[in-house]
Each structure stands twice: as structure tokens, then as C-alpha cells.
Amino acid sequence: MYKNTTLLILSFFQAVQLSAQSVALRGTIPGLGGDDVYLIRSFAGPQKIVDTARVNPVGTFTFDMKDQPVGMYKVMTNTGMAVKLLFDKHSVDFKTSGFQQGSKVEIIHSDENKIFYQYLNVVDENSNKLSLLEPVIQYYPPSDPFWQTVKNKAELLQNEIQKTASNLVTQYPNTMAAQFIQLDRPLNLPVTLTQDQKTSMEKQQYFKFVDFKDTLLLNTDLFTKKIVGYLSLYQKQGMTKDEVEEAFMPAVDTLLNKSLQNEKMYLFTMHYLIGGFEEFGFQKLLLHIAQSSKLNVFSKNTPLKAELQQKVYEIIHLAPGQPAPDFKARAIGGREINLYNIKAKKTLLVFWASWCPHCTAALPGLEKYYDPKNTENLQIIAISVDTDKKSVEKAVKDEGYKWPVIAQLQGWDSPIAVTYGISATPTFYLLDQDKRIIVKTEDVKTLEQYLKK
């Protein structure tokens, strides 16, 4: 009896171990034999390739998923075509006839994906039809009976999407698929609205189905697409950069206020917005976010919170009108540079690197503003984020730069670069005679507008 019980227990644990080792994502896409396919973690924020698999002659491939977190993934081909899939710690098996129009993804094994694709198939089919009907509703004479027929058909298509989403969310309330469907489902707006009326109503109802307390939403790129989609409602064609920044401010306030319901969601949303606005050089929006920060609402200390607190400090203290941080350092060749001892009417700090192609393209254009024998109007100080002195010296010689170059040779951790919050090259700080910041920019054309003044 004891021996048999032991065998049963051993068999059970072996089965559990085998099951834990065999969690996989298996797919079949005919015509890809011999190619590589890529598994992409399609979470909120930057997408990440986490594995590569070779496709066998019949088009089948397998990814080991036992160490992957739950959430949304994409299987992508070398041509950029992708299949979207959910992973819930259970194996997934799918096949598709390809990526031609009308091709369907067939889920062979995975309850989550069967639910999700019920929704996606209805949305894709009905949305394509709606896009063809909407111009007719907008521009065809409403007095014509055909207009009423088209309107009725459009409403049926919209209602079918809503009915499908509601039924799946109700029927499978504890699934990841239901949570993602609820996030993704479109609003059911009257089809006869003008574009302006539609935009106005979307602004009011945009987050109707979004639960900002649900942190699982960070495990799908649908959340960041929702953020971008909301911001786009506030941008009109032909807006200047300043107008876009002004228009985005109420949208940013709404996003941050709604995400305050959960610390993790707030930190992510704030980090995502800051990263995007830095990329576009939206300094007014960055300052607005920093000044209205609610980071202190949360008592828990996390690496992301500490990073954001440092970023907020940098944005506020390195904003236009603020005094530039002083520094002392030796330039290549031995000249000592003390920022506040420079007597020029304007001082330009150029953060660059020898390996940066954008720097090589942008910096020569500054030479027409700079006279090394007469720096009364403008002094340029270049600060390298290189780690190799010979590379800096070679770049200076090859490009013929005449301005002083500081190379602390600690890369992005160089003390001056850290003090000035440098995360990209080239970055320019233009200072006035009193060393107050006039502008910070990564765009040489924007910089030249200030230099010409």
C-alpha cells in the first residue's frame, strides 16, 4: 500500500513538472518554411522581442512560454506581418492561411484567444463595412430613401459590435480576454453626427469602458493606443507646435487624474507621456506635467517613482528662465572652463557624441554663428557623452570643430550630462548673458531660430 501510494504521488509530481515544462505557443503559417518568426511582448510602452523560432517546412513553429508573463503577444514575420495573441500561462495553438485580405486566424487551443477572436473578427468585419458607409451618411442627401437604408445598416453593424463585446464580457467575466475587450470596445455613437460632433462626444465618453484600477491593462498595447487615441482628439490639422501643446493640456490633465486611481497606472501614464513629449520637444507640456505632479500622493517608493521624481526636478529646474547649473571642467587641450565666468551675451551648450550621426549632421551648421576669435556674442561649449578619449579627439579633428570640447569620458553618467538631464544627442541649451536658460531643444532648426534673434 505504501509503495503504491508513493508511486502515485511521484507520478503526480512528474505530471505537474511535465505540464510546467510544456507551456508553449505553437503556430502554423503556410509558406514560411525556413524563415524566422519573432515573439513580441506587446505590452503598454515599447514592444520587446523576447524569442525567435525557425519555421519548419510545413509552416509550423513553437515558442517556449513557461517563463513569459501573462498578457498580449504578437507573432511577427520577417515581412512585418503579425498575429495578435493572448497568453494566460496555458499553451496556445493557432493557424492561419496567411495575411491576405479575408484570411482568418483559427485558434486550435486556448480559451482566452477563442474568446478574444470572437470579438476581433466581428470588429474587423463590421469596422471595414462601417468605414465604407460613413461617407455616404455624411454626404449623401438624407431625403433620399437610400440614405435611410445606409443609416440603418450602419447602426446594425455598430450594434453588433456592442452586442458581441457585452455578451463576451458578461459570459466570461474573469478572463483576460474580457478585460482587454472592455478596454478596446468602441463607443456606440450616433452614426449621423458630424465629425466635430463626434469628436466632442468622444472626448466626453472616451474612457467609458476603461477601468484605471485594472493594472493588467498595462500588459497590452491597447492601453497605450487608448492614450494616443485620446490625445489625437485634441489635435487639428494645421496646428503649430505651440497650438498642439496648448490643446493637449486638458487631455493630459484628464489622463493623469483618471490614472490616479492606482499608483502603478499613474506612474506608467506619467512616464509614458513624459517620454513621448520629450521625443517631440514639447517643453511646455513637460513643465505642465512636472508642476502638476501628484507623485507625493503615493507613499510607496519604487524605482519608477524615484526616476519620475528626478525627472520632475530636472524639468522644473531646467526650464526656460531658470539659472543653468554651474560647472567647472577642463576641455580637451587643457583649457579650464567655468560656465559662469563666460562673458558672452549667449552661451550654447552642445551635448553630443562622436558616434552620433545626428550630431555629425547638425553641428557643422552651427559654425556660421561662431567665431572662435570673437566670442563676445556667442560662445559654444561642446560636452561629449563619449567614453573613449581618442574617439572624441578624432571626431573633433575630422570635423574641424573650433569651439572648446569637454569630455568627462563617463558616457551618459558624465557629471555635467547628468546635471543637465541628458538622455539624447544632440541636445542644446542656449543661455543668456546671466546664464539663464533661453531654450532647451534637440532640434537644430529650432535652435537656429533663437540664434538668429
Image: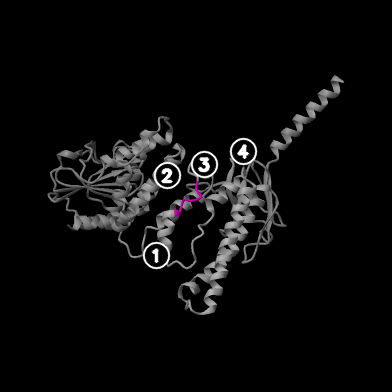
Q: Residue furthest top?
A: 2
Instruction: Out of 225 and 298, give the one closest to the viewer.
Output: 298
Q: Which segment is the magenta one?
A: 205-210
User: Farthest residue in the right direction?
Assistant: 1
Front: mark 3 or 1: 1
Q: Is mark 3 on a helix, strand or loop?
A: loop
Q: Is residue 40 magenta?
A: no
> Does the magenta portion include 206?
yes
State whether residue 123 appears in this view: no
Mark 3 neighbour class, 10 Å CA radius: few under 14, some 14 to 19, many 20 or more:
few
Reply above or below: 250 against 11: below
Question: SS of the residue at dot 2?
Answer: helix
Q: Position of residue 107 (x, y in %)?
A: 69, 53
Q: Residues under labels 4 and 3: Cα distance?
A: 23 Å
> Relative to 275, is 76 on the left or the right?
right
Q: Residues within 10 Å of mark 2 (few under 14, many from 20)?
A: some
Residue, disc 4: 67
Say if mark 4 contacts mark 2, CB within 8 Å: no
The 10 Å Cα crowd at callout 1, few under 14, some 14 to 19, many 20 or more, is few
Residue 119, position as x, y percentages in the image:
61, 56
Residue at which label 2 appears: 258
Q: How crowded is mark 4: few (under 14 residues within 10 Å), some or many (20 or more)?
A: few
Residue tagged by mark 1?
Answer: 196
**Does residue 32 sit above or below 384 in this rendering?**
below
Residue linked to disc 3? 214
Q: Distance between the residues labelled 4 and 1?
A: 47 Å
Question: Is the stretch drawn in magenta largely helix, strand or loop?
Answer: loop
Q: Which residue lies at the image location 56% right of the left edge and 70% below the top edge?
A: 152
In the image, 395 versus 340, the foreground residue is 340
Tag 2: amino acid? Lys
- Comes first in the chain, label 4 or label 3: 4
**First reached walking from the N terminus: tag 1 or tag 2:** 1
